[in-house]
Amino acid sequence: MLEKLFKLKENNTTVKTEVLAGITTFMTMAYILAVNPGILAVAGMDQGAVFTATAIAAFIGTLCMALFANYPFALAPGMGLNAYFAYTVVLNMGYSWQTALTAVFVEGLVFIVLSVTNVREAIFNAIPLNLKAAVSVGIGLFIAFIGLQNANIVVGGATLLELFSIEGYNLANGVNASFNNVGITVLLAIIGVIITAVLVIKDIKGNILWGILVTWFLGIVCQFAGIYVPDPELGFYDLLPDFSNGISIPSLSPVFFKLDFSNVFSLNFFVVVFAFLFVDIFDTLGTLIGVSTKAGMLDDQGRLPRIRGALMADAVGTTFGAILGTSTTTTFVESASGVTEGGRTGLTALTTAVLFALSLLLSPIFLAIPSFATAPALIIVGFYMLSNVVNIDFKDYSEAIPCYICIAAMPFFYSISEGISMGVISYVAIHLLAGKYKEKKIGPLMYVLAVLFILKYIFL
């Protein structure tokens, strides 16, 4: 049955490889179950209810990816989009979280229409091959940067960013942390990177997953030894799962279907919808391009077969996520960790989806995995994706320079979508001004995208 549904032999994979890849993807994404409720709680939403909504939205979106497209990509409420939801739409613009959820719901419906009409697929196919490779490299640097930040190896400082020091960390965050909380976790994260790297070099199956688990285990040992001392006020929690409240699923009722359509005809509401739409489209496209390029899933023309199903899964996940009570559900770049483990079909996504469903019952275990344990996985996956830089034609400067701009923009602007924007604008502008547009035969959609990106920066 699994062979018939997911075509494992055709994709040169096995059930064991796919399941292991799905577990790995889940482990690198599990942090969203803890982070998303915390961010949306700032907007006034019930944290327990948002946790349940996050897990179910991830389950639905990832299951749709498995069934609609047979790809190993996983979905969940996206980072960045949740911060925009809480801090910009609700706190700064003054909308209620119910109205913000409505904007996400409308965005999801628009996504469905765009996916059915092939607009998003056309956008994906219009991006040149070199630029697609650059997106993959940029995402690699971006997620490695996230890993370095999550582990506090990189902190804010006088030079904007600097290598971790306890003094620098305290100054940047206005706290009084010590070696026994932040210091030991940074050291554990560095050790985790080395352990994961050795496992990769030794070609140990499940190397990234084992890296996460070993790093977490070392943290637990340090806690028992008194080297690591939890301090919840500083954000350093007990590393052991907490089953004091037993196994229970927080109720969805405080956020379920709490949509408010009273502001849907206002100009600002459409601006909010467009912002959600824009970021989600290009974060999703960027992730699909980057991860599928690394996995060798693109055809000779740089197109991703069955992309319509992948985009539809994203659209359906977003729509149902808004109904459940969470911000935009999108394809996660952490899917690259499962692809790196050999995941090539929807069975990887199905495994991840099932684990998101199970996390409702075993949430104390999954939420106990600290960021310093998942950070090494992100850093190593960033290395894997960075290797795609060899597919960029650096001999042709008209191709290489826009790729360079695209790659640099993602980590420096902390946004996949901004990297794509800068890449597209610079690609079109450089080819036009250098007189290369005729020989390269840039498609009309690239010009349209460039104009839209420029207008976005002018008016938004």
Image (cartoon, helix red, strand yellow):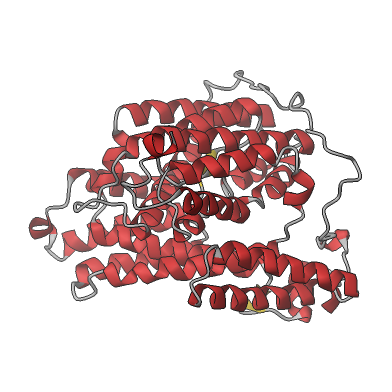
What residue do we see at 52% from left, 33% from top? 317
Can residue 192 be seen?
yes
Image x and y of residue 394, in percent: 24, 74
Can residue 426 be seen?
no
Q: Residue 93 falls in which quadrant of the image? A: top right
Image x and y of residue 309, in percent: 37, 34
Foreground of the two, 33 or 39: 33
Image x and y of residue 231, in percent: 88, 63
What residue do we see at 77% from left, 39% from top? 47
Q: Residue 155 falls in which quadrant of the image? A: bottom right
Foreground of the two, 110 or 377: 377
What residue do we see at 53% from left, 28% from top? 319
Classify residue 289 as left or right of residue 248: left
Classify residue 87 as left or right of residue 206: right
What residue do we see at 44% from left, 37% from top? 2
Classify residue 318 as left or right of residue 174: left
